[in-house]
Structures are given as structure tokens and as C-alpha cells.
Amino acid sequence: MKIISCILLLCAFCTGYGQTPEWISDTTGLPKYRVRSIAQDKNGVIWMASSSNILTSFDGTKFTEYNSLPANTAIIDMLIDAKNNVWVGTFAGAAKFDGDKWIYYNRQNSGLPGDTVNALSLDSAGRIWMATGGAGANRGGIARFDGKNWKFFTGQNSGMPADNDVHYVDALKVVTDASGNVWVATYYGLLRYNGSSWTHFKTNDGLPSNSITALAVAGKNVAVGTSAGITVFNGSKFVTDAEVNNLLPGKYISSITIDGSELWIGTNKGVVHINGNDRKTFTPGNSGLTAEFITVVMVDSYERKWIGTIDGVFNYRAGGTFLYAAKDTTSNTDTTSNTDTVSTHIHELGSKNNTQTGPSLYPNPVQSDVTFLINFTEENQSLPAQLIIYNSLGVAQVQTSFAAASEISKTKINLQSLNAGVYFYEVHSGDARYTGSFSVIR
């Protein structure tokens, strides 16, 4: 059985497109940096969480920015609960926003098993599940909150498997299936809890890699993204389709979204859309996307696909062109939120913010030193360029600057301190911004 057959089993219904074909991108009005999560509330408002510690909402007319989270509380994930509250997971615990104030939950005041809340999910009973991690023995695990009471699942109280090398759990994602099983993504395999015991799945069980990067559930079937491709657990075994994996522009699966009979797979090199035999791959090379790394795909109630990247947000309606949606710069003076109105001007993407050619680097993969090159055009020669290197969780590892140059600026960086893995970089100068990825090997 191929993965497409499993995907069809995942689907409870088929949804069609009912909107005018259109891509809309706004890298100035929407979050400017890595967008970690996108969700829609019960009122139809779209919420976007960026790693720059800012929430942005869009009600169809205006953008409102909420920046009242504590400093250095980088957002990792977000969800909307059954009561329409906005929850975020951060490196300092979890926080709930009711539209007026924030309530914070951490190891100190709530007993969370880990300092970092890597992921949030909502089950059919309206309970919130949190995947946590954190350095230190006996740290990390899963937390469940029903609005009043907490329940924790750790290696100590439930036998949750820990990393054999560091002896703590680093839970990266958590979801629950129709049978009530809890699925947990880690970098050392996929964990399943059936209410009494844990099962630890690894590559010898059929996973493409032990590094689990994305999860999506429909019914009793689980789509599993890894650092080496995608597979589906069909209730008894993992089924991997080579044809689907060969479509992927990148093997690192960053997000999986199931929308009726359709599947969206975000990778480190672009996004794939599968609807039966209709399969499309979108990358910066063949579409209006300006960033390769896809952080999230969210389908709203109007069947619009909101695609988060490390370079901002895109909005997709099937079959059309890529457009850039301009935004007015006027805003109110409220220190909690800033509101901006979308203008009626639509520009073709690439007609602005395109003042220089993209950067290049060598060697790739990197063992120790890497050299970045950036080409400055005449109108951008007076502006320096900023370089930021992120790990796969979106945490900045290196920050440096290029000096302004008449033509080409070059900088050499030693990356000996970085662990092996995939890293992503952002270079910006003035209004221009470019992103890419590279690998570090050891």
C-alpha cells in the first residue's frame, strides 16, 4: 500500500476550492521574521506567532500586533483553545492570552516537567497537551491541562523513554489520535502512550529517521515527518512511499497539514501539495515564495492556505499567481498592540525588496569554516547586511554583519561550536531579505 492510499484513509471528507485563485504575501505587514505557528479562532481571526516574540492577528481588514510578552520569551508554538484563548509555548514555559491579559505557566508555578514548551495540541475533549524539554536529569515530558488540573507524563511517573545519552526527555511534538493514544516526537524516535505503557519506534520499525520533526493525525492514522522524509503509521505499521518522498524538494519535514483529501507537506526547501494524483511542488525557484524553509501550513475556514516561512507569511488560493499585498504604515500608539490596515494596492512579488542578488556560501556541507558572499547593487551599496544563523528550532546561533561594499562583501565564520545538523540563515539589507539553509557535519 502506498502512502497516498494511507492519506486517503486519513481523510474524513473532501474539501474543494471556492475562492478566486491568488497568492498573497506581505513581509512588511505580517511578521517579518520566522513565523512559528498560524491558527484561526472561532471568530475567523487569523493569528500568527513569530519567533521574535510577537503575536499578530488579522481580521480580514487590519493587522494587530501584540508585543506584551516578557522580553526574551521566544515563541515556539501556538494554538487556540476551546474557549477561544490563544496559547503559546516558549522557552520559558507556556502562556495563555484571553484578549486582555496573559497568564503564565512554568516549572515553578505549575510543575511543568520541562522548562521549554516545544509544542501544543488540543484533544477532542478540549484538553491542552504540551511537549516539553529541558537540560538536566529527569527533565522533560508531556503535560496535560483541562483548564483546572494538570497531569504529567515523565520517565519517572509513566516510564516515558528518555534519551539514553543525556537521560532526559526532549519532547518536540505531541498529538492524540482517535483511539486516545498519545504520540510524541523526539530526536531519538517516535513515542506512543496507550494509557498504560509506552512504545518506542525507531528506524528498525520503519521510520525514515529517528529524528521526528512533524506529526499530523486523522482518525487512527498518523502522518510522521522526519529529517529524512515522511511516512504514515496505518494502525499496525509504517508505510513509506518512495514516489511521494521523491517529490519533496527537501527531505527535512517541517510541517504536515491534512485538509480533507489533500495533504500539504512543508520542508526545508519548499512545500508539496498532494490531492490524489494532482501533486505540485512550490519553491522559490518556481513560484513567488521568497523563502525555502516552510514552518507551518494552516487551512482556514475559507479554504485559504496560510504558509509560514522564515521570511514571513504567504496566503494561497489554488491555481493563481503570487502577489505582494502592501500595508499602510499608520498605527495606533497602544503599547500593547499596534493596528495596521491593509491597503488596496497589490504589487507583483519581486517588484520591490529585490535590490540585490541572493547570498552564496561555501563549502556546503560545513565542517569548520564557512564563507558567505553577498552581491551589492548600486542602490544598496551604502547599506550593511545582517546575517543570522538559526538551528532547526529557530534559535539564533550566530549573528554578524557584512560591511557595505561597492560590489561583493565576504565574511568567513567558524562554526566549530555548532552540532551536526541542518541550519538556516537569513541575510537582510535595507528592505531586501534572503534565506537559505546548509548542513553541518561532524
Image (cartoon, rainbow, N blue to C red):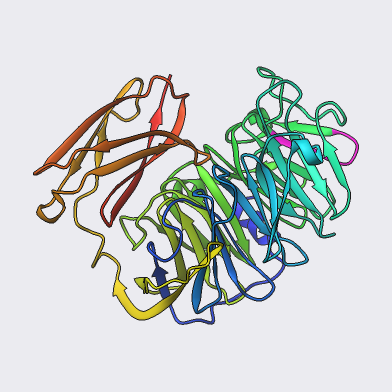
Image vertical order of residue 319 relative to residue 100, above or below: below
Residue 40 covered by magenta stretch: no
**Residue 368: % across, % down:** 34, 20
Q: How many labels sit on residues? A: 0
The residue at 37%/63% (across/down) is: 28
Image vertical order of residue 25 relative to residue 233, above or below: below
Left or right placement of residue 272 versus residue 3 in this view: left
Left or right placement of residue 105 versus residue 283 in this view: right
Res. 155 visible in picture? yes
Q: Nearer the viewer, residue 258 or 53?
A: 53
Q: Nearer the viewer, residue 109 or 290?
A: 109
Residue 192 covered by magenta stretch: yes
The residue at 89%/49% (across/down) is: 149
Residue bounds of the magenta highlight = 190-197
The residue at 40%/31% (across/down) is: 439
**Residue 126: % across, % down:** 81, 60
**Residue 90: % across, % down:** 62, 44
The residue at 82%/50% (across/down) is: 145
Q: Quadrant of residue 284?
A: bottom left
Image vertical order of residue 306 relative to residue 190, above or below: below
Q: Nearer the viewer, residue 275 or 179?
A: 179
Q: Quadrant of residue 43?
A: bottom right
Q: Nearer the viewer, residue 57 or 350?
A: 57
Q: Quadrant of the C terminus?
A: top left
Image vertical order of residue 322 relative to residue 212, above or below: below
**Residue 224: % across, % down:** 63, 45
Res. 322 visible in picture? no
